[in-house]
Amino acid sequence: MYLLTKQFHPINFAFSQRREETKISDRDMDFHIAITSYPEDIYHIEIRNSNRWPRDYRITRVSMSEAGADSGSDSGSGQEKAATRIEVDSEAGFRWVEKAGTNKAGTNWEKPLLSANPGRWFGTSGSAWLFCFSHDPDMEYYGLGEKHTPFERSGRGYRFWNVDVWADHPMDQVVNGDYDPDYLSIPYLIIKKGNTYIGLLSDNLFPGMIAISPENQVAQQLKIEIDYPPTISIGAEGGVPSLYCIYGPSLDELTCKFQTLVGKTPLPPLWALGYHQSRWGYRSHEDLEALARSFAEHEFPADGLWLDIDYMENFKVFTFNKAHMPHPERTAAEIKEKGFRIVPILDPGVKREKGYPVYEDGKEKGLFCQNPAGYEFAGMVWPGFTVFPDFTLAETRKCWAGYAKAFFEKGFEGAWIDMNDPSTGPIDCTDMLFKGGKTEHAAFHNSYATLMAKATVQGFHAAHPDKRPFLLSRSGSTGAQRYAAHWTGDNFSTYGHLGRSIGKSINLALSGIPFNGPDIGGFGGDCIESLFIDWVKAGFLFPFFRNHTMRGSRPQEPWAYSENALKITRHFVRLRYHLLPYLYNLFMDQEETGAALLRPLFYDFEDSDEFPIGKIDDQFMVGPALLHAPFVDEKGRTREVTLPAGRWFRADTGQWISGGRKMKVSRKAESTPLFIREGYLIPFAPGKRTDNRVDLKRIGIFCCLSKSYGGECRYRYRADDGLSFDYRKGGRSELEIVAHVEKKRLKVKVSEMGKGFGRIELIPCTVDRFSEVVIERDGAEHILQPFEEGVRMTGNLMKWYRWTLPLP
């Protein structure tokens, strides 16, 4: 049994004191050290000892192209062109420095990034290992994947061991406090020092830990003083010690490099970015028909209708309850005809039942995890006693993919995978062995969900080879984003969980999981009307946007509250659909470069002592152009907004505001503080959004420029069918749009960069009334005439000038 609340401490480790060439040694053991330098200041440190760590279990390990790499040495062609340098020796210990230039005396000047004292940087204790570095008081810490803890990570230790949160933590702590570990494990630490960023990734899936100068307390009652320097410790209970060191220097550059290292998120289908409706209890053809009818009646746009475990026959995976879903193919087809897609749940647990084909097939082929006694390991979840596919075996993944293929062929274009932590109920999961019963549970516990997702996506591709998959997973590990989006698990209907969700999702985005979001309204408990409204307003621009709640809670559909609540939430969901072209293009950017979608302020703006923007976890950027500062407390009538430098258009009031300052904003029932950055172009879907249809070839371009703007702004807009892989084969259209103000005239130049999806029509829109708007396209200039219309953006009615060609 792995303790969730205890940490390694360096005091119990033997540290290597000497280094000779490729060998480091402690008092009684030698280790082989390899430091590989890659282009763009990425380094890999790996330490080997065949007796201590006889096998490398990292089947989901990250990888880098070997082109330009210099392996096994601290210097060479890879580092000669680098901006930084890493060295490890007996005298200096560990040093990572930035080559900052030459001083007036002509000597090289280096800026320290990270260091460790001689004889204190790498230690072992049995099969456990630690890298230790010196903590600097100027450092701030972010990342670490999914953690239900404060946004900035200083002052505590963290475990990396996927859990079923409700089953493995005290419920009072889950509802009202912080907890760790969580559903997903990514041991990746971002260190911020001023405006320079570095990242440290433990490429190891064993139970791990990262401690950042934690407070020394006994029984959470007494803080004690000890003679031990503040330390950053990164380690694991087993497996090959493997550490990636990544230099930004900006957070954007760091995130793109890290995302490239571990894998970018493939472009999802457009419908996956819409609004989704779910509830534990939806189970039948009639439930789905009623939902589709209600969304249409209320003119409330939505894309996904979700099924939880009740659609199955006795909770058996890949089955359908004949009373609730007698004809799943017909149901899927009829619901799709109405404009929606069904997203059913799949769990890994297979009911141990004679005659059940999935069980009998896996048993005959020996595809289930074994226990130490040599039998099938059994857990206890929804179907009762369940066995678990051994996804570490290629044959198991192939078999699961076959069942998934048949499942998706019934007309489903997405699925969500749950209980894949793996959750085994009240039975200890550590008796679940892998690799045919030959490998300890710890080696693959954290990667179990990722391997399940990989197999499920393989089945989807077999069923729908021309369609992009949409898979949502509760658990995962480093690299999971290559196969699935992620929701932050079973949360609660409290303002505390709403407030925590922003920092939680931002850190996930910075840790390689950009397609993520919480359950809107909260899964557990009854969501009161004010909280539901505030959660929709806070999350309407999150990458993933699903309303989900548990069985037995009050109804949580938008029309289950008052008419006013329906009106407000519908407005924000419609606004999301207006902005889907912008969000979709951000996902295109992510697939191309790895840029984050949801961002902290310091991703796009510099921090300073005079105007600090670090640690802010109640406002965020959506791409580079939108800043959202929602109200996430229950009673506050005003809140402070930190507005970075530049000019901003405040969408909820229609005012231009100068940044570089803090300001007070008042709470209003029908609006939220949303700011648009001057100098940016925002593509949007024009017209009233009453359903989920979005024509990516007919868009508006909101030109966020005032008449006094002196610069030039550019935007690269792309459009495709939003569903297939044709965009990879030329089936995409692309425009380069350049706008600038010239003597109170707005000039917009549109250049065709690709026509694979057909011609894109656009309507330029402005807030300020310019003396003239000129659009240049196809080698000709057109002077447009203004058409004034009122548009509600985030609550208030404001003037919006849409510019169109004069009527003949």
Image (cartoon, rainbow, N blue to C red):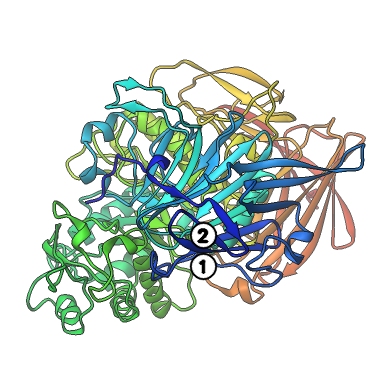
Camera-side residue of 423 and 131:
131
Contact, mark 2 vs mark 1 (Cβ under 8 Å): yes
Camera-side residue of 106 and 483:
106
Name the amino acid, label 2.
Leu
Residue 713 falls in image quadrant = top right
Q: Is any part of residue 300 visible from this angle?
A: no
Residue 444 falls in image quadrant = bottom left
Looking at this view, name the residue that lies furthest to the front.
Answer: 27
**Which residue lies at the image location 68% right of the left edge and 40% below the top edge?**
196
Q: Which residue is mark 1?
A: 723
Coordinates of residue 527 in the picture (x, y in percent): 29, 33
Local secondary structure at mark 2 = helix
Looking at this view, name the residue that lies furthest to the left.
Answer: 354
Local secondary structure at mark 1 = loop
Q: Which residue is mark 2?
A: 270
Q: Is any part of residue 699 visible from this angle?
A: yes
Camera-side residue of 244 and 217:
217
Q: Is 394 on the left-hand or right-hand side of 75?
A: left
